[in-house]
Amino acid sequence: MSDKLVIGEVSKPRFEFRTFGQHFEEAAKRMARLSNPVPEKVWERKSSEIYIMSRTNDVNNTKIRDGKMDIKTYVQTVDGLEQWNPLMKGEFPILAASLEKEVFPAFKVEMPELEKESYTLEEFLAMVNEHPDLQAVRVDKHRFGYMVNETICEVGNVLINGAKIVTINSESTEVEDIKKTLADVKLDGIENINYLQAIKRVIGMIDKPLAN
């Protein structure tokens, strides 16, 4: 018997379906109707984050929230669902050694010259914005949490440098539970688009549309 997912708790690596577009009204309505009760803390959440986009990397997802850096790395795709694992967590000010050994290798870009022992968030972002292959992107999220078929789900309004789009997702350790959820909320056949891909499409780093 598989471990049940608990929202807010760290569990074994999850698989995820996520997509982005202009509207998912029917799927969002069905997700809300089918949801089991969820903790009040995930009914509605707002956050402001900074994602670091790299022209040469699509496998490591780097975001900064509340002065902390979180990097996840792509593991595999199973039945169209992506699995990501934590790669690195850090705080600002961040040591130059960490930038050299963990952060810039994750971006898969040429290493800038580091002249200090540590860097504040502002100094790091200045370094990113000076790099020809990197771009810092501000992402504001307004998310509504659900649980359908024991999968953690959400519908979110997302601003990417001020451009408003909508995301909807289902994640679980169990692939079959996600597939059932996608069928139940009528998201079958919709392209799986992760945050990295969605942001790159919005800012023009990738010439491709969103799901709708």
Image: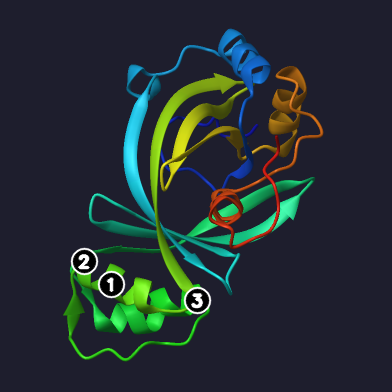
Marks 3/2: CA distance? 18 Å
Q: Nearer the viewer, residue 169 or 55?
A: 55
Residue receiving disc 2: 122
Q: Which mark is residue 157?
A: none
Q: Is residue 112 above or below residue 24?
A: below
Residue receiving disc 3: 133
* The image quarter in which residue 189 lies: top right
Question: Residue at image x 22%, y 72%?
Answer: 123
Q: Is residue 111 above or below residue 55?
A: below
Question: Residue at image x 32%, y 91%?
Answer: 113
SS at badge 3: loop
Residue receiving disc 1: 126
- Residue type at mark 2 is Glu
Marks 3/1: CA distance? 13 Å
In the image: residue 183, left or right of residue 133: right
Q: Nearer the viewer, residue 31 or 141?
A: 141
Q: Where residue 70 sits in the image (x, y, percent)?
A: 38, 58
State if disc 1 and disc 2 touch (CB < 8 Å). yes
Q: Where residue 92 sits in the image (x, y, percent)?
A: 21, 65
